Image: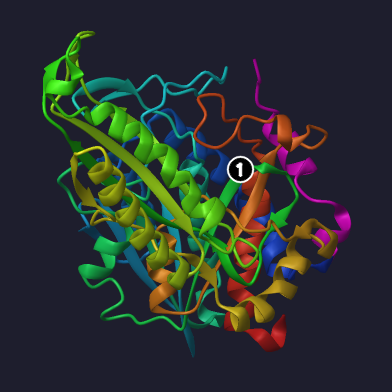
């Protein structure tokens, strides 16, 4: 089992000395002053995780902290979201900073003194709940950044909108949530930022590393649902019916040619995955229908629409070849667009990340087929989203448990790196002449 390093070790090992020397003095001093509190917040939130649209304790913790800083938080946005505006003492740009708050229906298997023992109901079942994606770290880092900015607000130029977002992993069935719902409820209506920033911890990087790239970063995520409708009959007499299982099997197989034969993957990658097949209940009964659900991942709008059309075509014509019919919902209603970093904003802020962690520790992660609903914010205004390494130094990230795993482990040095990187970016954007 993995055990956390003592807090002093985490802070000592977080960044190499040359990176700290390149940081703004305000960043270094704030990190030294606040990192203990950031770790404490993260541990508390980790021990008390909450699923999407149910982050009531976390939201209350955030709101109480913002009030203690003298801010006036708004609560209950998109069910449990919290926002607050920090106004600097001098005029300047407007920016937004976002942290997501929700946990996952995962039972923790990491030996931590603050490991989650929480349970909740998810899709009618009792499940364990865990911050298996690191959103506890995101909340704690932004709480720390907020405190650092408040301490220097008189000298600060501009305004900062703090966004603590629920349900990034998706709202419960039948509910709206996440970034899209916060926007629908007007989070950018009265405060239209010039730019929005976000970060995500990840096991694919070692502590001390940051990953970022211009343009497409994370894929668009689209869910689909296909119902293949046949005609029920006895399994010993298949000729008396229409077998939707055979039709569905042919459909799944043929759909693999959409990416392998119809999509120009020399331009950008794409994925079509079937995640569940449900049909039948008894060994000798051919059922009336089979349900298929899956996901499509793309990085280009044109490719995305072409794959939708190709999958509909495959579904309808393959089923027809078997004498079956389909009800194809491609895509379903709630989907995430591509998470893309504004190229100009990337070019402007990449030097800030270099200063925060050392230029040699800022890497290009390549295209990531995971998805993020930060994409909705970055579709409204220029956005920059970056990853912060969470795997201990000396451990091969390829062998580390991935985000969403019950064994996902966050080296707490990542909190220090994330705090310094975000605060450096914020201050350099608001005060470029002093960077």
List the residue tagged with mark 1. 36
> Residue at image x 54%, y 80%?
156
Crowdedness near tag 1: few (<14), some (14–19) or many (≥20) residues, C-alpha within 10 Å: some
Q: Magenta span has 297?
A: no
- Residue 197 picture location, percent across and down: 51, 68
Picture quarter with the N terminus:
top right
The reply to whether residue 174 is in sight is: yes
Question: Which region of the structure is painted magenta?
Answer: 1-21
Q: Nearer the viewer, residue 351 or 312?
A: 312
> Residue at image x 47%, y 42%?
136
- Residue 84 picture location, percent across and down: 34, 67
Q: Nearer the viewer, residue 100 or 370?
A: 370
Residue 229 appears left or right of 90: left
The image quadrant that residue 414 belongs to is top right
Residue 404 appears left or right of 283: right
The image quadrant that residue 205 belongs to is top right
Q: Above or below — where is 32 with respect to 123?
A: below
Residue 234 appears left or right of 43: left
């Amino acid at each position: 089992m993995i055990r956390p390093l003592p807090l002093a070790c985490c802070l000592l090992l977080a960044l190499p000395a040359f990176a700290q020397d390149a940081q703004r003095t305000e960043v270094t001093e704030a990190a030294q002053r606040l990192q203990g509190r950031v770790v404490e917040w993260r541990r508390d939130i980790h021990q008390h995780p909450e699923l999407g649209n149910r982050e009531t304790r976390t939201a209350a913790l955030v709101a109480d902290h913002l009030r203690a800083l003298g801010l006036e938080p708004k609560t209950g946005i998109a069910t449990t979201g919290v926002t607050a505006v920090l106004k600097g003492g001098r005029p300047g740009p407007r920016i937004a900073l976002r942290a997501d708050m929700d946990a996952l229906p995962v039972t923790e298997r990491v030996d931590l003194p603050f490991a989650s023992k929480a349970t909740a109901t998810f899709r009618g079942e009792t499940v364990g709940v865990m911050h298996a994606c690191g959103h506890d770290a995101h909340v704690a880092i932004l709480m720390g950044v907020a405190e650092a900015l408040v301490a220097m607000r008189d000298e600060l130029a501009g305004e900062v909108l703090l966004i603590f977002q629920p349900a990034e992993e998706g709202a419960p069935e039948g509910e709206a949530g996440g970034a899209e719902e916060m926007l629908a409820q007007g989070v950018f209506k009265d405060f239209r930022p010039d730019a929005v920033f976000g970060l995500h911890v990840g096991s694919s990087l070692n502590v001390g590393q940051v990953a970022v790239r211009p343009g497409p970063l994370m894929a668009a995520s689209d869910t689909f649902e296909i119902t293949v409708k046949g005609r029920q009959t006895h399994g010993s007499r298949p000729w008396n019916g229409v077998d939707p299982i055979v039709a569905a099997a042919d459909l799944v197989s043929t759909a693999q040619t959409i990416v392998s034969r119809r999509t120009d993957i020399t331009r950008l990658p794409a994925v079509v995955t079937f995640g569940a097949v449900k049909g039948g209940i008894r060994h000798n009964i051919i059922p009336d229908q089979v349900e298929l659900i899956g996901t499509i991942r793309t990085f280009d709008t044109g490719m995305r629409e072409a794959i939708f059309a190709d999958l509909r075509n495959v579904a309808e014509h393959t089923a027809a070849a078997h004498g079956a019919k389909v009800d194809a919902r491609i895509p379903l209603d709630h989907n995430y667009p591509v998470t893309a970093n504004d190229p100009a904003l990337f070019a402007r802020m990449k030097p800030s990340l270099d200063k925060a962690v050392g230029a040699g520790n800022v890497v290009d992660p390549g295209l990531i087929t995971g998805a993020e609903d930060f994409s909705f914010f970055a579709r409204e205004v220029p956005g920059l989203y970056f990853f912060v390494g969470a795997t201990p130094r000396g451990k091969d990230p390829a062998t580390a448990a991935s985000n969403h795993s019950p064994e996902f482990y966050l080296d707490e040095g990542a909190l220090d790196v994330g705090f310094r990187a975000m605060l450096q970016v914020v201050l350099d954007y608001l005060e470029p002449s002093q960077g």
